[in-house]
Amino acid sequence: MLASEFIEVFDAYCPPALAEAGDPVGLHIGTLNKPIERVMVTLDIRPETVTEAIENKADLVIAKHPPIFRPAKRLNTDNPQNKMYADLLKHEIAVYAAHTNLDIIENGLNDWFCELLGIKETSFLTKTHELDGKEYGIGRVGNLSTPLNLNDFAKKVKKDFRLDGLRLVTQHPEKLVKRVAICGGSGEKFYPDALAKQADVYITGDIYYHTAHDMLANGLSAIDPGHHVEYLCVPKLVELFNEWKNEFDWSIEFIESKANTNPFQFM
Amino acid sequence: MLASEFIEVFDAYCPPALAEAGDPVGLHIGTLNKPIERVMVTLDIRPETVTEAIENKADLVIAKHPPIFRPAKRLNTDNPQNKMYADLLKHEIAVYAAHTNLDIIENGLNDWFCELLGIKETSFLTKTHELDGKEYGIGRVGNLSTPLNLNDFAKKVKKDFRLDGLRLVTQHPEKLVKRVAICGGSGEKFYPDALAKQADVYITGDIYYHTAHDMLANGLSAIDPGHHVEYLCVPKLVELFNEWKNEFDWSIEFIESKANTNPFQFM
Amino acid sequence: MLASEFIEVFDAYCPPALAEAGDPVGLHIGTLNKPIERVMVTLDIRPETVTEAIENKADLVIAKHPPIFRPAKRLNTDNPQNKMYADLLKHEIAVYAAHTNLDIIENGLNDWFCELLGIKETSFLTKTHELDGKEYGIGRVGNLSTPLNLNDFAKKVKKDFRLDGLRLVTQHPEKLVKRVAICGGSGEKFYPDALAKQADVYITGDIYYHTAHDMLANGLSAIDPGHHVEYLCVPKLVELFNEWKNEFDWSIEFIESKANTNPFQFM
Amino acid sequence: MLASEFIEVFDAYCPPALAEAGDPVGLHIGTLNKPIERVMVTLDIRPETVTEAIENKADLVIAKHPPIFRPAKRLNTDNPQNKMYADLLKHEIAVYAAHTNLDIIENGLNDWFCELLGIKETSFLTKTHELDGKEYGIGRVGNLSTPLNLNDFAKKVKKDFRLDGLRLVTQHPEKLVKRVAICGGSGEKFYPDALAKQADVYITGDIYYHTAHDMLANGLSAIDPGHHVEYLCVPKLVELFNEWKNEFDWSIEFIESKANTNPFQFM
Amino acid sequence: MLASEFIEVFDAYCPPALAEAGDPVGLHIGTLNKPIERVMVTLDIRPETVTEAIENKADLVIAKHPPIFRPAKRLNTDNPQNKMYADLLKHEIAVYAAHTNLDIIENGLNDWFCELLGIKETSFLTKTHELDGKEYGIGRVGNLSTPLNLNDFAKKVKKDFRLDGLRLVTQHPEKLVKRVAICGGSGEKFYPDALAKQADVYITGDIYYHTAHDMLANGLSAIDPGHHVEYLCVPKLVELFNEWKNEFDWSIEFIESKANTNPFQFM
Amino acid sequence: MLASEFIEVFDAYCPPALAEAGDPVGLHIGTLNKPIERVMVTLDIRPETVTEAIENKADLVIAKHPPIFRPAKRLNTDNPQNKMYADLLKHEIAVYAAHTNLDIIENGLNDWFCELLGIKETSFLTKTHELDGKEYGIGRVGNLSTPLNLNDFAKKVKKDFRLDGLRLVTQHPEKLVKRVAICGGSGEKFYPDALAKQADVYITGDIYYHTAHDMLANGLSAIDPGHHVEYLCVPKLVELFNEWKNEFDWSIEFIESKANTNPFQFM
């Protein structure tokens, strides 16, 4: 089967047209015009992921974070970033990125977060697109079936995401949490919508010190579980791909990247 | 004594000319042309600090983070940021900021960090100024008298800064740490100098996920203790001000802000 | 009664949405969420107006010229501009600005100018908005019931506006004036529309020397009565507010600012 | 004699290198490579000046205000500005402009203003150039031999410049004027230097309403005699040129433009 | 007859609204408000064309290339470009330009190219406008009735355009040419459309070395006949104008410029 | 021997610091940290050059034109440009570019042009650098020992460069040529210096139609031999490299690229 045939199905599920403006989703490295047997799914493209892809003899890698963030002015391979590109090209491993479109689509990453944490009756946090008369948005806001106080809810987040640590932003750790907003990645810029939609807490990664102050000044509590919780997309996409495999009777092997690309350890 | 007389001594110690270009240090709110009796020192100007300053009947506040980051287009007091400005003006509390100049000067915040952590033989991390034939720089790099492995060193950082948590970026937690680079605040952009100056680890706050990947790709380990470790400047400045009080026989009372403005709690 | 209730009525008459793009109309200083008893109306916010507002115990000031033209990077009160903001905040006097929206709305400032000068059958000079299928514009153009020669008309303008001087731009002081264009403030950029709409003379303030040459080269005569003729809005707004007071049975006192803020005296 | 020979002498007196950056001084229209017999001096190039130059059979016009302010995208002669260019080219009348260099040089326009008003012991207002170890500046500040109160001094300015009106900006018309700053043209942006150099009053043209407020807020009084007082340069340059005529034994006739190009009449 | 009456007919044929955005078509020099007897048509306005227009006593010149490409900051006539403007103004010769609109309109220059080369069944190359529900575009693509190999077709182009040389870009000089794209002037930026529309060869002028490489890399052959082939518009416009002369019974004489303005000779 | 050792010698001859600002010279693809046995020299990196380098088992390619002109946003190999990069990386062929520095250095490409054409007593055309007290410049201007008329000189250029055609820009083909300016590549922007330095003709590639008109208007004749004459650097560099090989006793094989990358054929 050709890589392009697989991507056709993937794009129908997760359309590039639903990415944020300027977000470089799609084919980054290599070609889709070739047969594939092994597809690896990963959060990041890092040296250890490239090694893993080579060892797994992957033909195609699906990545959540686009590997070429800054256009390459040079391809000198003493630079570790360029070295990764060269290794992928040398081993003819194509890389295809789904980034904010995976945060926006229905049955996408933010929905999987809600499912994991027991957040129900969800709608999007911030509107991003209108397509064929239907509205789409990034992030989600919804309700807990059983309200918890904030401290206990933060512990639940830590346990459900299997984190070794998280950062809590609040002046009222005992307040009851009923309504939760969430946005994977670094969603701090959407916090005014969390306020407007009456969330009791906002879960998002990489909150900056002075933004945390702004949140507190506006009476919003927040949980920062880091950026790496997006790893959840790896097993979920593999699960979804295996469903398609059955449905369409494909003979492709789908592989979860096992390399841990979380750069942070909590102490 | 006039506020301006006190600031004259303070500016000689911590010259505004040694701040980074565009950093808005100096008088932010009120006037220096008035007598003062009580000076409060704080890391941030937040609603709780303003309350504290009012209760302490402070005439002047020295802050590490400039309170007006974004020029005020309006002064409508329904906005909590503007409300703080109005309360300070109403109670005639002047605010004076020393920011990156305090990170750069000798016997300044980064030196106090080194002292606390036992880092010796220090020089600056990144050159920023040349003044009267002398070089100045931000951050410090120096050596531990007793090398430790990285894990143990990170624990020492956590203990010495009394943190409830920190983030470690490394692929080699067992490596021996002899040479340490440090920069208070958000110093991630200076990491290439930490590499160039052979630091075994770089301590700085607010490291972004993708920068952490770049650090690892370049073989640099890092410790992110957050942005709030800068609180150390509060007792240290008060200590220094009291020395001046004795030396110059001032009758001013110097007060440490006790309000905790750290927006993050680790779990 | 709350300030916000009064402003709701005022905004219905003079919608902020009808201001020029980027014109900073609306609440500038303080809050509308408070009871009011005394409202002062002024053209400019200057030190003498602030003194007057304090003496009058005004709770709210309506100003034609927005007091914060340049965003405030500092609030150091040695600067006379910042001193005014501090005094207003200290005395809890809110300031609300209606600027170009008052020049554009029907039954607004330019209409009052026409009424004063006997200009009839008016329409707008330059279209600015289309709202709910209706067109709005700035300035007015209309006809005199009794044509006058230009010299006599200029004398009439001087007398009606009670000016101590004005500037006349013409090569034909004896020409008959039937059709008049007018725009309060500094409206020199709209002069091509005065030409296109066959005005015999264009009345507007602050005409620049080289623009005056351009007007003459294009055969347009002009009268520059200065910028301060906009003072007319002060008694007219107070008159209007008192009508509302009767209509809605308010117990607010409306006060005309008497401070003369015209910076120019003619000799 | 060639136009270029005359201009060589003129440029030595009034070097183009002493104009403000970007000020388009020098040859604007025609050529200097031709014999000349009649040179006309004018403040502005306007249709009536062009007519006058044609009637006077001038070969060269020296103008204080550069005739091409905005680069010409078209030369369609239905536009009155382009028509002037075409008429000058058709009659082979060259135009050469000295603008801010004439405001800056020693024995230039601002010095002539001081001479006229009896201002002595002058130095420049705002430094603009350093050339061959010598400093140059625009505007002048100096002292009156006999102090006058401001009202009387303004009357003297009106009389000496033969104005039909001027605008006075002050809150203290009775204050004594000893030290005067002056800058021809539109010099409002230099007012902070008038303050810094302890001027009791600042004379400059085209002051904008809101700048007049800033001047008052800073305690500076000002006199705005308009932009056309620069006309003084016309007789003064002709006088100077006739001195050169005697000195170098030239047979050129120098003509003062008599066309009144002041677009404003005071009423 | 007035120039404006002639231009009214011309504009109906070749509407300025169909020029590319920013293309300075229309009246460049002089006025249309005058009687005309002789109209000259030219490709370029160069010194020799101006001489010719003067000798022919032309009242109006129609030019394909707008004479004022860069706005004139000065009109000093020692500069040869300004000298041409001065000569035209002096002799009251108006200049009117039709540029890309002549490349876009139906029965315009690109259609005349197709006619000359036997290209049939044409449609535009690149869409530029949508006007009154109709689409317009620049360049043309169409088919040869008799396919030729590329070498022979290039020889035909050279012969039909009477060129002394041309440049061929190909890796397959023997390939059969059936479908041809063409765009007068410098149309290299439209080459992706020639590819998309399956042209076997693309004819356009002034191809840059590195663009030629890009064309080859994408498998496109090209013929560069230079920029001067646009001269074809001169006899064709005169032919068309003479048809109108008959139709409307005008007494104007239409003149082809004979000056050769091709700056290049091939060797 | 390492590639870096060879490049050290090459850089001493042709310093990157002597390239024009922003010109991306230096290592573009691969690494210099590897042993080399075969070095190929080429003008352009095109698909046929890459094929040739692979067949020649080259380890390093020295190219006159930098292969990455536009930073690569993607490395999808369906794009022929990216395909070249991938093939080079896959075969571990490094690419190093010397571009305008080779046009500027002494004993560089422009000097080889002069040698070929018999131009003596040369100096640079346009100054570009001052380094260690010495001036450097791009292009050359010098004299012919035997003056020729322009037509004959153009024929000599065509013959010496073995061209199938060239373009001549002149109004005086019979004029005598004694002094010649030359600049490889596209040097049309330097033509004012050719004028200033009294060249009778200027040789440079890719002259644009409207620039050719400007040259003629200024009385300058020009010869456009195309961009590909720079191919001369290929044999000259290989000759130079073989001299170094003898001098330093290297065992590297130096190979001239034989692929013809000239995209143009003259007809």
Image (cartoon, coloured by chain):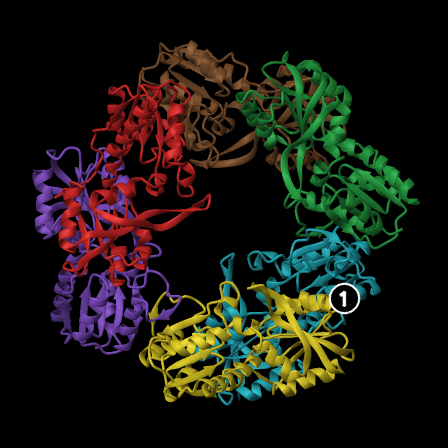
Chain colours: A green, B brown, C red, D purple, E yellow, F cyan
> Please, is residue C50 above or below residue D181 in the view?
above
- Residue C170 lies left or right of residue E61; in this view the side is left
- Identify the element where label 1 is drawn: helix
> Please, is residue B244 above or below residue B102 in the view?
above
Residue E9's x, y, as percent? Answer: 45, 77
Crowding at mark 1 (Cα within 10 Å: few <14, some 14-19, many 20+): many
Task: Using the rendered view, name the quadrant where residue A102 is placed.
Answer: top right
Residue identifier under label 1: F49
Task: Using the rendered view, name the quadrant where residue D29 is placed.
Answer: bottom left
Chain assignment, label 1: F
- Residue A238 lies left or right of residue D226; in this view the side is right
Residue F120's x, y, as percent? Answer: 54, 78
On the question of residue B94 being in view, the answer is: no
Q: For the residue marked with disc 1, what is the amino acid?
A: Thr
Q: Identify the residue at horizontal 72%, vertical 43% (top origin).
A: A66
Q: Identify the residue at horizontal 55%, vertical 14% (top origin).
A: B260
> Please, is residue E172 above or below residue C99 in the view?
below
On the question of residue E186 being in view, the answer is: yes
